[in-house]
Every structure is written in structure tokens, then in C-alpha cells.
DNA sequence: ATGAAAGCGCTAACAA
DNA sequence: TTGTTAGCGCTTTCAT
């Protein structure tokens, strides 16, 4: 049996309130008793029971994280940042992989509610009305990361997708490319899909390139979809000399397809990715990409959630972190 | 304020025990009252308080997971399996990334103890005496995954590293290679290091190859170490025509180095990896590798831990899952 | 400075 | 079938 506060009190020959005091307000306890209690705690390897504490404080010191895909390298990096922040702030982190499944996500929120997490970091793309309703019903403070919401004024932290996209395409144009295609996220099931498309279009028009509006193919999160999308796009537009991919995984899928067709990257087609996941610098060729501050995104999300939990509000509701172009080997001058 | 059992009881016009009963033993409650209670629960969006329950059941219905590196693709796959099993079994999962840091791991165990997790899945390489002591002090049921322990008889689930290694090298030999090198894990800080080396040696000797005992270079978990290790190995033994890498990440590091030196894979050197992480099939060239049943490893670990928690023991203490050769593009006949 | 006692939200034993 | 009540382990008044 786990020792309780009573065991410690008995062993130290004091009352349970004294034991409680040495744990919470040691300065209110006489030195000799305090020492005896400390000794007993050590000897018994006593750990206060988090259930009993939670019952009183109504706090679990646990944060919940909802991510769509634990196997995505993007989220893995984010988790690291979040967990480091949690250690600093004294929270535990409960990570839940929704697999982009609505029911599953909803079930996780119920679970968080029951387990009384102090707050939730939501990294699962679109904040649907059902999610929002449940969240507000439960009154659990929530912060969005690398997504945002138009309808609901939840605090969020992300990058400027439109600008980042624009910078990527502008870089390609600067390299002399004029026939640029894009492998994007479907607009109907992603948040960053539309702004990244908008950035692409803005760069194309601003620099007076021929109408590339339709030279876009959409894929669904994973590698093999991007592989197929690249096939479609190149079949329709064989003149393309550069491809803007909205994620590094898409870039890898595209390059993989090109490789299978004996098309050289960057020799014949330049590829730029997005995210700068850890794998980006390991791929062959090493990916030129728009780097998101992935670790920071996670770290700040936890900090922001902490702010929301403790103060009830948040300094800056929508926080934008800087992106940065990483030039490596998958792009070349036209 | 979160509604309590009292609120539900009041609204339904019954006692709190009746409410408790409809949640735990509905068949013991009269139909009309049951319906009224259900209605009240729904209307109030009542969720029983996990703290109060935990205090009574002395169970948190939460499992703890200790992993060395959340950014490793290997562990990401394992987590998915584990979480799916947890959903099935009614547990939540608390994932903690130790970053291979001893103090951090120890602190996480304390945290698990305080939060009263029902059990721990330990996936962090070596089970050091300090870890084991703390674990037994806390009396938290523990299962090892993709590692094992000679000294302590903890339940574990893994593959047969020696045999898997042997199979990989045998495959290379079957391809006609006679000068085979290896990029391995350091023996002093890994569990699978020695058996994988042993498998390599056994294959070499069994097939009467020249003494390759020393044609091994060691790396430290990550890509860039393998990159450097490959450089060292090839500088000493330029005659090598095949390389056995003990992880896919090492294989990628090796290939990356070779690429930078304009050495063709598999044209001039064949590379075989280990693990079959998701990325293995996406790399260029696609990795031939020894597949571990990564998802299953995670899934079974959670099931096994559940078995240990509920029955106090475990059917098979050391459980071995099957590995399987995945032949792709990074190897070729000599 | 210290102890006794109330109560956090729930379950389970006991009564009715 | 139902309600009353005694804890689970802890913090926090309130006395002393």
C-alpha cells in the first residue's frame, strides 16, 4: 500500500495537519517537528496523492494535447517543444492522437473533461462547431496551435501561411522559374490550404507570370497522395520547371515520383517544401523549404495555455511566429 | 462550476447513490428513476470527477509511457499502436519523452507515481538499477518494450535482434557480397547493440566469409552520427560492397554520405537498414530493411501491461514478435 | 505552533 | 429498489 499522510504523521509523531503544512507552508512549522516530518517522508518514500489534492485544488496540473497524426514528423517536433515547456511550468502532458477521426477527437475531449485536464492544446486542423461546443460546455481553456479559427475567438499561435507561401514561390521566381506548379492541401479539410494557395497566387500575379492558377494539384496529408498528385499535375502540365509543395512530406512524395520517372531534381525540376521537419535535411536531395519554428510553436502553445489558465486571458490572441527560408539542394536556377 | 453528482441528484429528484448506481450498475435502478437521472446527466453534461473516483478505486485508468526520443520515427509508430490498444482497454496514455536523460526519466517516474498511473511501459533502452529501484519502491507495474533486462525479470516484448540481424546479413551474402561492413549501436549505451552485432558475426562466420569482425563502426542513434561513422568505416575499408545498418535512420545517414561522395547505392554499395519505419519506403532509394512489427510492438505492450495490472502476472514473460525482410531498392546483387 | 474537524465528489456497505 | 452514511487522502478553517 502506498503510504498516506497518516502514516507519515504517525511515524513523525505529529498530526496530519502538521505534515500537510511542512509540504505547503514549511515556514509555519517548528523546526524540530519539521525535521522529523521530513525524515518520515524520506523514509516512507511518501508522495502525496494527486487524487486527493486534485479534489481540493480542482486542478490536475495536466495539459491535454490533441494532434491529428503522431506519425507525422511535423507534430513530433511540436510535441518536444510542448513537453519541454510543460516541465518548466510543472505540468504533465497527455497526448492524444486523433487520427483525424471526429468521433475519436470528441471522445478524447470527454476523457480530458473527466480527467480534469487544466487546459487543451488543439493542433487538429479545423475547429469544428461540434468540437467548440463540447469545449465550451466543459469550460476547458483551449489554445490552438498551427491553426486558427475564424468563427471562434480562441487564442492561437501559428505562422503566416500566406506570407510564407509567397516567400517560397518568390524564391522560385527569383531563380528564374516561370512555370511553377503547386501541390497543395485540399481546401475543404485543412486550415492552411487556402492561405498557402493565396500566397502562391499572389507571387505569381505580382511578378507577372503567366496564369498558373490552375496548375495546382491537391493531396491529402501523406506521401503517397503527393506522389499521385505530382503524376496528375505533370501529366497535365509537362512544361513545369518548379514545384511548390505545401509540406516536406509532399515534397518528398513529389521527388520520389520524379525519381521513378527519371526526372532529375533539381536538374530538371526544382522542388521547394514547407515545414523543415527533421527529415528535410536528411533527404536526397536535401530539401529547400520554408522552415516553421516547430519546436517554438509547441513551446509557446504550452506557455500561452498556461497564461490562459492562470490569468483567465491572454495577452495577444493571435500570435504569429516567424518563418524562414532554408535553401538546400532541391532547387536550382532555371 | 462543473456539475457534481449532487446537482444531478437534485435535478432528477433522487439521492446521490441512485445517480451513482445508474452509472455503475444501471440494472439495479428502477426504470423511471433511471430515465430521469439519465436525462439530468445529459442536460447538465455531467461527467463524474476522476479524482473522486480515483480516490476510491485507487486506479487512474492511465498508463505512462517512457520513450527516449519522440522525434524518432521508430517510437512514433509504436505510440500509435499503444494508443489504439489503450482506447480499446479504456486507458489514457501519458507519454513522456526522456530525451535519454537520466534525471528527466527519474523525475517522470516520480510524476507517474504522484499521478498514480496504473502502469508504465518502458521503452527507454537500458533498465538501470536506479530506475528499477524507483519503480519497485513505487510498486508500479512495468513492461519493457523493444528492450529487455538481464538482471531484472520484468515482462518484455521485443523482436529477436540477433536473428533479425543474422537474416539481414545472410541476405546480403546471398546477393553475393563478401566484404560487408556494419554501422552499429554502441554496446555500452544500448540494449540491442550487442545482439545485433552477434547476428552479424554469426552470419559472417557461418558462411565462411573473410574476417569482418572489425569492419564495424559505431554511431549514436541519429542520422549525422551514422553519416560520420560511414566515413570512418569506408576510409579504413574501401573494399566494402555492402553495409548493414542497425536502424533505418543509420541507413539514411550512410546513403547520404555515400551520395555526397558520389558513390552509388545500390550500384556500388548495397545498404540494408533495420526497423522499417514509415520513412523507409519514402527514401531514395527505397530502403531494403528488416521490418520490426512496430505498431504491434506498441499494441501488445499496452495489452501486456494491462494483463500485468489486472491479473498481477503475465502469461509469457519474454515475448518475441516476428521480424521480416523487406526487399526494396537499396540492395543489389554483387 | 499545533491539532481537531469539516469537506472536496464519489462509491459501497448498510438500512429501510 | 432506494436513501443514509462512512470513508478514500488531502487542505484548510477554526480553536487552542
Image (spheres, coloured by chain):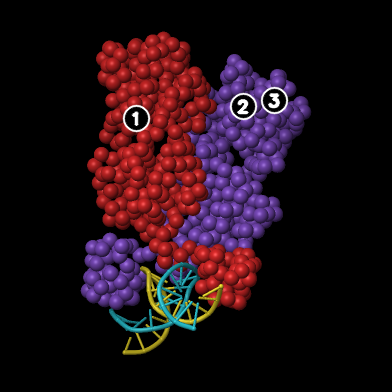
Chain colours: A purple, B red, C cyan, D yellow
- Marks 3 and 1: which is nearer the front? 1
**First in sequence: mark 3 vs mark 2:** 2
Classify the position of the N terminus of chain B by image quarter: bottom right
Residue appearing at x 47%, y 20% in the figure: B327
Q: How many marks?
A: 3
Classed neighbour count for the residue bearing mark 2: other residues with Cα under 10 Å, few (<14), some (14–19), many (≥20): many
Residue labelled with disc 1: B161
Examine the rendered structure and indicate whether residue A100 appears above or below residue B261.
below
Among all residues in the image, which is located at the extreme right? A211
Q: Is residue B331 left or right of residue A143?
A: left
Q: Are marks 3 and 2 in contact (CB under 8 Å)?
A: no
- Return the chain for callout 1: B
Q: Give the distance between the C-alpha atoms of the residues marked 3 and 1, in whole angstroms.
A: 44 Å
Same subunit: marks 3 and 2: yes
* Quadrant in the rendering for residue A180: top right
Disc 3 secondary structure class? helix
Disc 2 secondary structure class? helix
Q: Which mark is residue A227?
A: 2
- Marks 2 and 1: which is nearer the front? 1
Q: Which mark is residue A233?
A: 3
Same subunit: marks 3 and 1: no
- Return the chain for callout 2: A
Residue appearing at x 31%, y 22% in the figure: B200
Amino acid at each position: 500500500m502506498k503510504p498516506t499522510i497518516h502514516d507519515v504523521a504517525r511515524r513523525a509523531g505529529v498530526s496530519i495537519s502538521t505534515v500537510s503544512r511542512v509540504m505547503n507552508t514549511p515556514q509555519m512549522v517548528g523546526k524540530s517537528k519539521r525535521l522529523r516530518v521530513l525524515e518520515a517522508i524520506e523514509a516512507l518514500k511518501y508522495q502525496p496523492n494527486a487524487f486527493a489534492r486534485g479534489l481540493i485544488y480542482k486542478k490536475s496540473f495536466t495539459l491535454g494535447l490533441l494532434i491529428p497524426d503522431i506519425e507525422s514528423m511535423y507534430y513530433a517536433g511540436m510535441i518536444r517543444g510542448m513537453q519541454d515547456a510543460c516541465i518548466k511550468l510543472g505540468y504533465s502532458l497527455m497526448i492524444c492522437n486523433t487520427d483525424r477521426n471526429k468521433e475519436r477527437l470528441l471522445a478524447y475531449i470527454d476523457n480530458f473533461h473527466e480527467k480534469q485536464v487544466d487546459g487543451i492544446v488543439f493542433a487538429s486542423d479545423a475547429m469544428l462547431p461540434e468540437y467548440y461546443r463540447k469545449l465550451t460546455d466543459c469550460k476547458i481553456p483551449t489554445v490552438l496551435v498551427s491553426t486558427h479559427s475564424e468563427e471562434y475567438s480562441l487564442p492561437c499561435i501559428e505562422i503566416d501561411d500566406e506570407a510564407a507561401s509567397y516567400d517560397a514561390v518568390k524564391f522560385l521566381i527569383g531563380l528564374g522559374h516561370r512555370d511553377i506548379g503547386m501541390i497543395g492541401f485540399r481546401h475543404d479539410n485543412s486550415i492552411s490550404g487556402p492561405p498557402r494557395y493565396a500566397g502562391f497566387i499572389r507571387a505569381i500575379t505580382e511578378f507577372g507570370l503567366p496564369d498558373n492558377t490552375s496548375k495546382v494539384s491537391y493531396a491529402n496529408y501523406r506521401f503517397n497522395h503527393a506522389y499521385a498528385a505530382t503524376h496528375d499535375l505533370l501529366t497535365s502540365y509537362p512544361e513545369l520547371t518548379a514545384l511548390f509543395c505545401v509540406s516536406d512530406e509532399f515534397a518528398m512524395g513529389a521527388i520520389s515520383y520524379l525519381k521513378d520517372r527519371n526526372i532529375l531534381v533539381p536538374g530538371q525540376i526544382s522542388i521547394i517544401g514547407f515545414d523543415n521537419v527533421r527529415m528535410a535535411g536528411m533527404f536526397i536531395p536535401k530539401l529547400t523549404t520554408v522552415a516553421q519554428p516547430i519546436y517554438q510553436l509547441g513551446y509557446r502553445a504550452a506557455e500561452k495555455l498556461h497564461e490562459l489558465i492562470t490569468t483567465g486571458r491572454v495577452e495577444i490572441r493571435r500570435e504569429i511566429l516567424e518563418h524562414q527560408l532554408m535553401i538546400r539542394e532541391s532547387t536550382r536556377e532555371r
